[in-house]
Amino acid sequence: MDRYDGFWHIYKNLNPTSSESVLDVGCSDGLQANYLAQQLGHGIIGLDIDGDGFEVAKRGADKVKHTRLVQCVRGDAEALPFGDRSFETVVIVYSLHHMAHPASAVCEAWRVLKLDGRLLIMEIVIGEDEPRYGCRTLLLPEVEEMLENARFGAVATKRLDLDTVLFVADKRVASKVMAPCVAIESRSG
Ligand SMILES: C[S@@+](CC[C@H](N)C(=O)[O-])C[C@H]1O[C@@H](n2cnc3c(N)ncnc32)[C@H](O)[C@@H]1O
């Protein structure tokens, strides 16, 4: 089972509805977005700060079915161009570590999720004792801390292979009692 299959296996077990609204943040050329749309059998929205991959994403979507399954939107994960409580599910796949302020992106995901929504993050994480090189810079507890600070409730983690972890965070549980969302790092720094 590859990583995308592993992702879908877990997502499917969350019983997505037949029409659930899904946002893929950092969709790039839509590999994951198209795979997900195909599995769900309906359209999803892919967002990226860089539109270079959108043509490939749209071609991939055309191949999946006659109708276009992935709608591409250019935008910043740290200031999503969607209203509060717009989506049932937000996914961020291998993109968090590319972002300047990943904690802000996690807060934004929380904002655009419906009250019973969930965030699925598939991310490469490194161990405490591993060198941080390139943009591969997140530790598992750091992602967990971002989710906690963004007021997500229950967070489950599943290691999909040696360095990839899937985080499943439920908005519902803690959202009523926690303080407003504040990103842990400053946007300017
Ligand atoms: C490795 S690619 C993601 C691959 C894709 N999710 C997939 O599974 O096929 C990382 C993407 O994150 C995007 N990205 C980086 N910072 C971003 C931001 N602030 N907002 C939106 N997208 C961002 C990059 O432009 C890049 O396309």
Image (spheres, grey):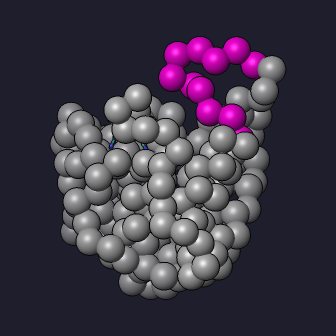
The part of the image, by quadrant, that contains residue 158 is bottom right
- The answer to whether one can see residue 149 in this image is yes
Residue 135 in the magenta stretch? The answer is yes
Tell me: residue 60, above or below residue 189: below
* Residue 71 image offset from top left, x and y in percent: 23, 60
In percent of the image, x 53 and y 45: which residue is there?
184
Task: Tell which residue pokes out farthest to the front in this image.
Answer: 179
Tell me: residue 127, above or below residue 47: above
The part of the image, by quadrant, that contains residue 167 is bottom right
In percent of the image, x 70 and y 63: which residue is there?
155
In percent of the image, x 75 and y 19: which residue is there?
130
* Residue 105 image offset from top left, x and y in percent: 42, 50
Q: Which quarter holds ligand 1? A: top left
Side of 173 relative to 40 (left or right): right
* Residue 103 image offset from top left, x and y in percent: 50, 46
Q: Magenta region, mostly helix, strand or loop?
A: loop
Task: Tell which residue pokes out farthest to the right in this image.
Answer: 129
* Residue 92 image offset from top left, x and y in percent: 48, 51
Question: Residues in magenta?
Answer: 130-140
Residue 181 in the magenta stretch? The answer is no
Tell me: residue 146, above or below residue 139: below
